[in-house]
Image (tube, rainbow, N blue to C red):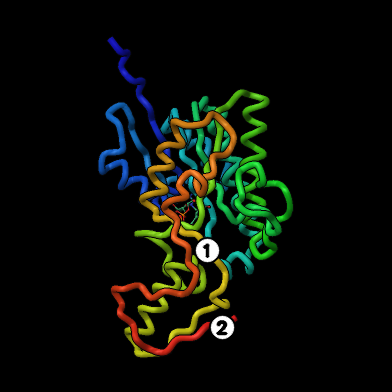
Amino acid sequence: MAEPAKPKRILVTGGSGLVGKAIEKVVADGEGRPEEEWIFLSSKDADLTSATETKALFEKHKPTHVIHLAAMVGGLFRNIKYNLDFWRRNVHINDNVLHSAYECGVQKVVSCLSTCIFPDKTTYPIDETMIHNGPPHSSNFGYSYAKRMIDVQNRGYFEQHGCRFTAVIPTNVFGPHDNFNIEDGHVLPGLIHKVYLAKKNGTPLTVWGTGRPRRQFIYSLVISRAEAWGKEGAATGVPNVGRLLGQVFIYLMKIFIPPPFSWKGRGGAVG
Ligand SMILES: NC(=O)c1ccc[n+]([C@@H]2O[C@H](COP(=O)([O-])OP(=O)(O)OC[C@H]3O[C@@H](n4cnc5c(N)ncnc54)[C@H](OP(=O)(O)O)[C@@H]3O)[C@@H](O)[C@H]2O)c1
């Protein structure tokens, strides 16, 4: 007879965000298993920039597994304006979470990196072996370098302590609970909000950029299934979710108007 599965207590930092909420839904809809207890956290449970609060949180919940999503996240303009804050806050959060996980004997940590950490000047297709092959785009160097350092830290915990700390690299995520703030959010929710306002107010639609760059997007509920996979998958190293889930990408070759808005006004690109 097969042995019963060992109980797992899975702590999700950043559980109130876009990706965290999607994982919560996927788990509630059947992806969770009977032996698993899922705990979704927000900054109200602890400020993870504080080592003391982070340690207390881990001692309280005693997780066996961690999906680490908590981060200072923002769109292009917020990144450009606050590079130092993105670096400091994210480095503190990541160091506190990974070290508390190590101290509490967590069996596996899966952190979330981002494709923007790849070198600005690179060849395509990109893969996880290329993360450190050159500087990231200068606009969001604070966020990018902080995320890259998770890979360095994972390697250190593996080599020195044998910890199974790994990471996934998703591209731009969109979905329910997104940040629709036009200044601070990501491109897709920002565009949706702009189209909504143009339609509601009968005003021209102004879109930033030339419209020429190619961008990749992944729906939050799809990435959540990949995250659930990550908690079982590789012991260390960095699975590139972009590559794993290549078939679900949407290539945004030009600005598109979401069908629900049926917008027929004037538009223009500012580049
Ligand atoms: N969104 C994307 O397109 C994208 C793409 C690639 C990778 N990622 C990565 O995926 C992860 C999740 O992103 P997301 O879009 O879901 O982010 P999000 O919606 O901005 O959510 C951020 C989460 O982090 C928590 N948090 C922030 N600062 C914290 C602190 N000091 N202490 C404790 N919790 C804190 C927030 O809690 P509160 O709700 O309480 O503030 C929230 O739950 C991040 O690591 C991000 O870098 C995102």
Q: Is residue 44 visible?
A: no
- Name the secondary structure under disc 1: strand
Query: Mark 2 vs mark 1: which is more N-terminal?
Result: 1
Q: Residue furthest right?
A: 134
| Picture quadrant where residue 228 is located | top left
In depth, the one of 248 and 178 nearer the eye is 248
Q: Quadrant of the N terminus?
A: top left
In depth, the one of 247 and 219 nearer the eye is 247
Residue 109 x %, y %: 51, 34
Mark carried by residue 270: 2
Q: Quadrant of the C terminus?
A: bottom right
Which amino acid, mark 2? Answer: Val
The residue at 36%/50% (across/down) is: 221
Which amino acid, mark 1? Answer: Arg
Mark carried by residue 154: none
Question: How busy is the neighbourhood of tag 1: few (under 14 within 10 Å), some, or many (20 plus)?
Answer: some
The residue at 54%/44% (across/down) is: 240
Residue 200 x %, y %: 32, 84
Q: Are marks 2 and 1 in contact (CB under 8 Å)?
A: no
The residue at 25%/43% (across/down) is: 29
Query: Nearer the viewer's eye, disc 2 or disc 1?
Result: 1
Residue with the mark numbered 1: 215
